[in-house]
Image (spheres, rainbow, N blue to C red):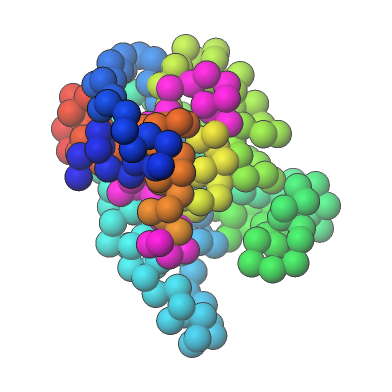
Amino acid sequence: MNWKTDHRSFYYANDPEPEDPVLDPRKTALLCIDVQNYGLKLHDDPHERARWEAFHRRMRGTVLPTLRVLQDAFRRRGIDVLHARIACLLEDGRDRSLSQKLPGWNDLLMPLHSEDGQIAPEVAPTPDEVVVTKTTDSALTGTNLRLVLHNMGIRNVVVAGIYTDQCVSSTVRSLADESFNVLLVEDGCAAGTEALHRHELEVINRIYCHVMSSRELAGYLSLDI
């Protein structure tokens, strides 16, 4: 992978290669989005289980290992790791955003202390790490994350998690609109299908973030991975 040339959309097809980012570790943070138990559960229905097989294979074989390695490397380097998760404050979920109340796959009812709403143990936060809880797609909408990042002096946000085309993309766009410098870790994200994942990377790359691999990112932050 070469982040400077991959995932180019129509709009950037003829643009020169971007410059290497200069990432001050003191102004950089890793944001892990919605890697929760609900997203890792296998379906009881055989047809649905087969339909989601590729997603779960990518999660177990690529995303979770990559995210764990990144988290450990950031912590060793003294760079902040933050987390966002979906969970409603009320048991009946009436505090959820409209997108999480509509019928269908995205109808999520996960009270704050439910097992489904917890961050997966493989990538769980340490006791001193910030966790924001949201009932929206974007981790900035309806939370104090923007203020938290500002107070911590963060300007560069490294994003990973699920789903690439939904909460990850929404958060990336919100961060960009708030003038944060955003880097998306390609092998630290997944969507329902590889096609959806790749398409969304092409849509948001260059205009809202820079998409790169974990190893490419490691080179700019001197991470030991």
**Residue 91 visible, this angle:** no
Judge whether 102 appears above or below 208 on screen.
below
Task: Identify the residue at image location x=58%, y=60%.
Answer: 116
Q: Nearer the viewer, residue 150 or 18?
A: 18
Q: Against 46, is 40 above or below? A: above
Q: Residue at x 55, y 46 (%)?
A: 167
Q: Foreground residue, 29 or 141?
A: 141
Q: Quadrant of residue 206?
A: top left
Task: Please identify the residue farthest to the bottom as the structure is shown.
Answer: 46
Tell me the residue at 39%/74% (across/down): 53
Query: Is residue 24 shown left or right of residue 129?
Result: left
Q: Is residue 192 magenta?
A: yes
Image coordinates for residue 9, horizontal then vertical, percent: 39, 42
Which residues fall within the magenta stretch?
A: 174-195
Identify the residue shown where x is 54% and y is 15%. Answer: 150
- x and y, in percent, of residue 75 in the image: 31, 30
| Residue 18, image x, y percentages | 28, 24
Between residues 173 and 138, which one lies in front from this camera angle?
173
Note whether residue 15 is visible.
Answer: yes
In this view, 93 is above or below 16: below
Residue 128, compared with residue 106, is above or below; it is above
Q: How many marks?
A: 0
Residue 207 location, quadrant: top left
Q: Quadrant of the C terminus?
A: top left
